[in-house]
Amino acid sequence: MTARTRRRRWRLVLPFLPVVALLGFSVIAHGVEEPSPSDPAYLSPVGDGPDSAAELAEQLRARGVTIRRVTGSDEAFDAVEAAGGDATLFVPTPGYPYRGQLSRLSWLPDRTRVVLVEPDSSETGQSVDTLGTARRRWATGVTGRGADCRLTDAGPATVVRTRYARWEDSVATVESCYDGGVVRVFEYGVEFVLVGSADPFRAVRAAEHDNTGLALDLLSAKSTLVWLDLHEREAVPPTPPRPRTEVSPRPQAEQPERQEGPSPFPDWLFWVVVTLLAATLTIVLARGRRLGPPVPEALPVEVPAAETAAGRGRLYRRVRARGPALETLRAAARRRLAVALGLPATAESETLLPALQARTGEQAHRLGEILYGPPPETDEELHTRAVELRDLVEHVTARPVEEGEHR
């Protein structure tokens, strides 16, 4: 690989490096800013840090809510059952209870509220039959609760990241708030609330919009709040507890099989493609002078015609532009011939060719072939046409063409 080839390849790559760097920086920054459920302080009522919820817990206590912090899912179910329905079960990390625990939520006492923070499609399917994950955003969006939302009186909140919606084959009534970022449905006597982002509960986001108001409304509906403070995946116990026998079993077999049909591409891919297209368009516009055929330009300084011709010749030869090269010579020859014949420098072929025929005695079609003929196919043909032009100009002007003339 020659040095010229390497430079040419780098010219193609370099414009895209800033775009790649920007995308890489965005991904890294997003990963740093995104809270981790495995962090012991994540949405913990006793944690400390930007992702904790200790201040939220204090505000709930000020409203008269009794908070029971538990660190195991079995303990959480026992505490909710002891409250007899006057309890809210708060599950900030629905991916960490051991396998099968989320399906036990429907066995909780009637009137129990269950608040799940951003469950994914699998966790949603284990928890409720009615709802599915609609889509997931790259970053959390802000929106109002909506006119039909009776779940809360809070104002706009940063809760639209994962959206939830009712299955098409479901007949249950689903209350959708915040453009699907918060939804509520009643199943088997239990009130399920799915929240599409952890931001309303995080200390670092508490002061943004009405995040705190939304979090308080969701967690203070009952006198007792059972807070599952779990930050690692639970191991399945040797003998998992059995559900209460007095509650009719959940009719899983009667539910039709459903597939979400998610897109194989992540949601953020669309914006990456749009960014790359915008960057490509910007580069094309910035380098637009290099597109299309060569155009004549006034030189900033006076240089000998030989240098100008040599420079243009090297450029034309490099890209094999025989037609533009010959047309440049023809245009200069037509101007000089027209002036020598007492015609305007911009005289057209209808005026120039008859005058040339009268001066030289050549046939009109031969003169037209020299001055307006088709572009050459080979370098030899280009050379022949250039010699014919030079001879014609010298014959009409009665002076040789000097290579040192200034342009």
Image (cartoon, helix red, strand yellow):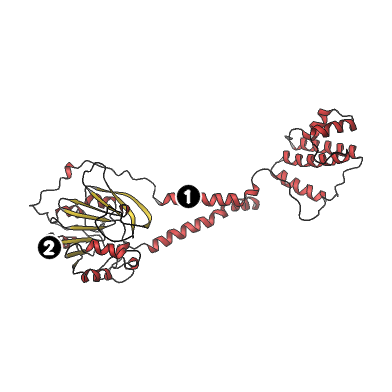
Q: What is the spatial separation of the Cα atoms under label 2 and label 1, in whole angstroms?
A: 52 Å
The type of residue carrying mark 2 is Ala
- Residue 274 is tagged as 1
From this view, report whether residue 264 is shown above or below residue 116: above
Indicate the position of residue 246 as horizontal and vertical percent values.
7, 52
Q: Can the viewer see residue 207? A: yes
Q: Residue furthest front?
A: 147
Question: For this rendering, which residue is in front, 158 or 93?
Answer: 158
First in residue order: circle 2 vs circle 1 = 2
Question: For this rendering, which residue is in front, 210 or 332?
Answer: 210
Indicate the position of residue 2 as horizontal and vertical percent values.
64, 51
Q: Residue furthest left?
A: 246
Residue 268 relative to residue 168: left or right: right
Question: For this rendering, which residue is in front, 100 or 266?
Answer: 266
Indicate the position of residue 166 as horizontal and vertical percent values.
26, 47
From this view, report whether residue 58 is shown above or below residue 344: below
- Residue 83 is tagged as 2
